[in-house]
Structures are given as structure tokens and as C-alpha cells.
Amino acid sequence: MKIQFLQSFNDDSIWISLIDNGFNKNILIDGGTSTTYSYTDKNKKLKGGALKLLIKFLKEKNLDLVILTHIDDDHIGGFLKWFGKDKEAIKHIKEVWFNSGRTIKKYLNDINSNVDSLKFKENTTLTSIPQRVEFENYIRYNQVWNEKVVVQKDVLNWNNIFFQILPPGKDKLEKLLRDGIKRKLNLYWTLPEKATI
């Protein structure tokens, strides 16, 4: 097994490569910021970042599993830049694990809250929630996501590779959903005035 932390700009992206029953498996945990995919150097030249170089290296092998641990920009930005710049990106991803607001809501059986897909402007300065929605819509549309919530203490068997899941547990998922509703982001999403969590 090989574990590599991608060279990035104070963000997070981890590549795991292993052999399973004679087949190479590639797992990418988080995508870093957009600069992990590409950036402009001090000479104003566009450079490929560690994520772009990894994707180029793996083009023939694919990413068997992509895991987005949470929606902070330093975890999701690289994925979104890749998806925006490479129209073939999804062909190189077999499966995604991701806890979205919608799937958390379903998991918590909160039928009184209405969390619809968020609409957001192209050049918004808001991060995380609009990025989450863009990521969620992309992976749902391209059918690489089973929409299952992954929670603390789950032991997931993925192709005979076992993952022990750390937080979030139910309490943290409830807080995450509650915080998202409190923000309201009136220009980007609408919730009933008295959404119940």
C-alpha cells in the first residue's frame, strides 16, 4: 500500500494506491483547494498542481474511490476545478463517498425541513455550501454516488478493503444540518421560516 499526501497549498488531499487481488486500486481522499489542481506561478504561467499531475498519471487506471470528507474549500476546491476544466473527469471516477445536506436530512428522518438543491451565482464569494451543491449535483447526475450517509463507527467493506469511519456521528450531522439552515443564504436557497431539525 502506498499513501501519498499531495503537495498542495495548506490544504488536504491524500492518494492511496494498493493492490487488491492482483488489481491496482486508487483512492483519493479530498481534492485540496483549486490550486491543488492548477495555479498561476509568480511568472504568471499556468502550472498543473499535484492533483492534476496525479490525474494525468492515473488516466489509464482511474480513481476507484473518491472520498470527500467535508465541504471546506481546502477539501473540495480541487475537485470542482478539475470537473470544470476537464469534461472527461467523471469517466475516471468509479465511485464517490460524500455526506450531502440532502442525504444527511434523509438519514436524520427530518421530513419537516426542505433542503433543495441550492442555486448560486458563478462568481460567488461564498464557499462550502455552494461548492457542496455543485459537487453533489455533478456526482448525482453522473451516477457515481450511491447517496448513502457514512457515519461514525460504520465499518464499510469496499471491495474487501475495510474502512473504519471516524466522526461525524449523528450529533455532528444534526449540528451540520442545523448550521446550514441557520445560514439561510437567502440569495441562494430558501427554507421554510420554521424549519424543524
Image (cartoon, rainbow, N blue to C red):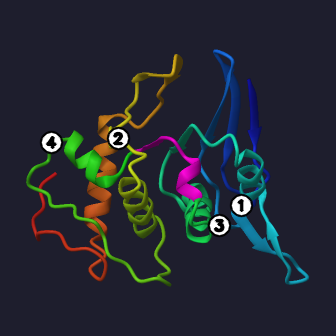
The amino acid type found where label 2 is placed reads Asn
**Earlier along the polypeptide chain: callout 2 or callout 1?**
1
- Which residue is the site of mark 2? 146
The amino acid type found where label 4 is placed reads Asn
- Which residue is the site of mark 1? 36
Q: Residue at x 60, y 42 (%)?
A: 29
Name the mark nearer the viewer: 4 or 2. Answer: 2
As measured in the structure, the alpha-carbon distance from the residue carrying label 4 to the one carrying label 2 is: 18 Å
- Which residue is the site of mark 3? 34
Q: Which residues are magenta?
A: 89-98
* Quarter of image, res 130: bottom left
Q: Position of 196 compared to 72: left or right?
A: left
Category of crowding for the residue at label 1, using alpha-carbon neighbours closer than 10 angstroms: few (below 14), some (14–19), many (at least 20) = many
Q: Secondary structure at mark 3?
A: helix
Tags 2 and 3 touching, CB below 8 Å = no
Give residue 191's position: percent from left, percent from top: 17, 69
Tell which of 150 and 57 is nearer to you: 57
Give residue 119's position: percent from left, percent from top: 32, 76
Establish if 24 lies above or below 66: above
As measured in the structure, the alpha-carbon distance from the residue carrying label 1 to the one carrying label 3 is: 5 Å
As measured in the structure, the alpha-carbon distance from the residue carrying label 4 to the one carrying label 3 is: 34 Å
The amino acid type found where label 1 is placed reads Thr
Establish if 35 lies above or below 13: below
